[in-house]
Image (cartoon, rainbow, N blue to C red):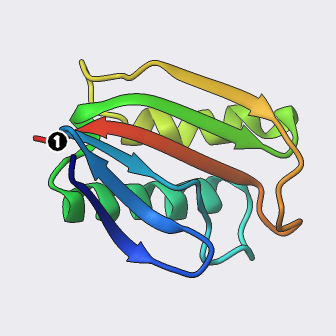
Amino acid sequence: MEITRLHVGKRLSEVAIHNGTVYLAGQIAEDTAGGIEAQTRDVLAQVDRLLTEAGSDKTCILMCQIFIVDMALFPGMNTVWDEWVAAGHTPPRATVEAKLANPACLVEICVTAALR
């Protein structure tokens, strides 16, 4: 039973791959200066990069969990999501309001995907 981990740190790995499934750690914006749209674009770019590195892509997402600090920001996040998500490959998704560990972050996205 092999588990491959990418970007292994002291506290967490950014990616774990096991049995044909890719698990991403929750992704937050690297640049927190922008609003919800900018942060969501930043996070989804990281998701794209990590999925590609793991041997997958957004058409293979099995489940997505989105944590947003204020549901009033939901429409802005959804606008960026709708531009990003692959038509015909919209994954099951849950979005909840949550207090994030870094107060400058407005959104955190956690993805599980199949390998290509």
Please rate how many residues cluster around mark 1, counting C-alpha atoms within 10 Å: few if below 14, some from 14 to 19, many from 20.
some
Report x, y in % for residue 27: 56, 59
Q: Nearer the viewer, residue 3 or 98?
A: 3
Q: Nearer the viewer, residue 15 or 107?
A: 15
Question: Image height check: is 84 above or below 89?
Answer: below
Q: Nearer the viewer, residue 10 or 74?
A: 10
Report x, y in % for residue 67: 71, 41
Residue projecting furthest to the left: 116
Q: Nearer the viewer, residue 99 or 31?
A: 99
Residue projecting furthest to the bottom: 10
Disc 1 designates what residue?
115
Question: Image height check: is 26 above or below 116?
Answer: below
- Under tag 1, what secondary structure? loop
Give the amino acid at mark 1: Leu
Which residue is drawn at the image coordinates 52% and 64% (left, top)? 42
Which residue is drawn at the image coordinates 21% and 53% (left, top)? 2
Q: Which quadrant, please, contains the C terminus?
A: top left
Q: Is residue 57 left or right of residue 74?
A: left
The image quarter containing residue 110 is: top right
Question: Image height check: is 63 above or below 52?
Answer: above
Report x, y in % for residue 18: 26, 45
Which residue is drawn at the image coordinates 83% and 55% (left, top)? 100
Number of marks in the rendered image: 1
Q: Is residue 36 left or right of residue 82?
A: right
